[in-house]
């Protein structure tokens, strides 16, 4: 996806907003910010979707759009306390740190889209690094008797997750063969495809070339493959690093622009407290189509985004339910 960025608002500490957006010739989209800065984007480089977008109503799938965080959501996180000196204040939420999903849901609010977007942002901005010492497994000579398949599979792991591509690919294949990929349920398929297509040498080249967006997508898959092996200390740490990333969020990016081809629409989205929010909608054929037709399309797009938010929330709740059932 192509994102439009500006540093002017970052210096002022303000949320950049779209003042105007219009279609131009030759697949160009013209965007004017509230500070009168103008940007031209090639529509072909933006994320494309259509009205046939699949939203599963059986709680087995989720929809993900890579969008920026809006001021409302950042302020919401800033109003929460990451750490508490009062053990009684934290004891009521002790169970939330049983799983990575529940810990982040308790702190971030929202559902699956908040989890994915905020995890990706924390990894991409390197506020969360998978090489952080707390994520390393302690050295031990202990061996279970009898030897378990899990021990055999994870005994070479340096971290609580498969930290090399070879180990991660092996873990993925075993879990897929055993039908145990629930940790990756709802993870965007392009992330998984990139993870599977990337060797350790390719991954190291991505790191060397600072291709952090791709690195973050791969790291998310690796971390989730080890999610069920994380201890409470690791879950607390990851949760705090994600919250810190959001609070340090340098608001210098535009909301993502997504092209809904079947509606001839360009839609700017951001991630708010309650899910995806529509910032602007413009139509490529807006000058030749009746107002009632455009109003109908707008209602359909708004309904679609609402359904996506509802479906993502159901997926997240289903994940939590499955985890707690498994841990009983």
Image: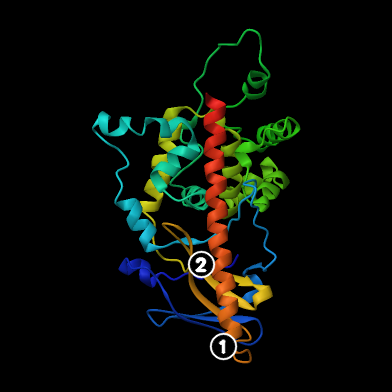
Vertically, is 118 above or below 320?
A: below
Q: Position of residue 95 (x, y in %)?
A: 41, 30
Picture quarter containing residue 258? bottom right
212 vs 98, left or right, is: right
Query: Mark 2 vs mark 1: which is more N-terminal?
Result: 2
Examine the rendering and report whether any part of residue 2 can be seen: yes
Q: Residue at x 58, y 68 (%)?
A: 2
Q: Residue furthest left?
A: 86
Category of crowding for the residue at label 1, using alpha-carbon neighbours closer than 10 angstroms: few (below 14), some (14–19), many (at least 20): few
Vertically, is 20 above or below 189?
A: below
Residue 291 — which label? Answer: 1
Picture quarter containing residue 260? bottom right
Q: Residue furthest bottom?
A: 288
Q: CA distance from mark 2 to mark 1?
A: 22 Å
155 vs 321, left or right, is: right
103 vs 87, left or right, is: right
Q: Position of residue 211 (x, y in %)?
A: 58, 54
Disc 2: which residue: 269
């Amino acid at each position: 996806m192509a994102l439009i960025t500006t540093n002017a608002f970052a210096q002022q500490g303000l949320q950049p907003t779209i003042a105007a957006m219009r279609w131009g010739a030759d697949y160009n989209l013209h965007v004017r910010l509230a500070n009168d800065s103008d940007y031209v984007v090639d529509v072909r480089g933006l994320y494309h979707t259509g009205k046939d977008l699949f939203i599963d109503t059986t709680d087995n799938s989720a929809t993900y759009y890579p969008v920026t965080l809006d001021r409302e959501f950042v302020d919401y996180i800033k109003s929460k306390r990451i750490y508490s000196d009062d053990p009684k204040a934290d004891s009521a939420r002790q169970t939330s740190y049983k799983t990575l999903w529940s810990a982040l849901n308790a702190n971030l609010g929202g559902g699956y889209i908040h989890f994915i977007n905020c995890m990706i942002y924390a990894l991409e901005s390197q506020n969360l690094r998978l090489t952080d010492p707390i994520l390393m497994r302690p050295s031990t000579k202990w061996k279970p008797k009898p030897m378990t398949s899990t021990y055999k599979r994870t005994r070479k792991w340096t971290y609580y997750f498969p930290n090399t591509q070879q180990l991660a690919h092996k873990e993925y294949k075993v879990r897929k063969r055993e039908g145990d990929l629930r940790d990756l349920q709802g993870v965007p398929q392009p992330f998984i495809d990139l993870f599977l297509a990337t060797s350790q040498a390719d991954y190291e080249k991505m790191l060397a070339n600072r291709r952090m967006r791709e690195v973050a997508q791969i790291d998310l898959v690796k971390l989730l493959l080890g999610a069920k092996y994380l201890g409470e200390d690791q879950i607390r740490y990851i949760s705090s690093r994600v919250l810190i990333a959001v609070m340090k969020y340098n608001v210098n990016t535009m909301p993502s622009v997504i092209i809904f081809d079947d509606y001839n629409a360009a839609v700017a989205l951001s991630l708010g407290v309650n899910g995806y929010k529509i910032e602007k909608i413009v139509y490529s054929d807006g000058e030749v189509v009746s107002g009632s037709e455009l109003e109908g399309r707008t209602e359909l797009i708004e309904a679609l985004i609402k359904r996506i938010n509802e479906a993502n929330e159901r997926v997240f709740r289903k994940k939590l339910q499955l985890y707690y059932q498994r841990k009983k």
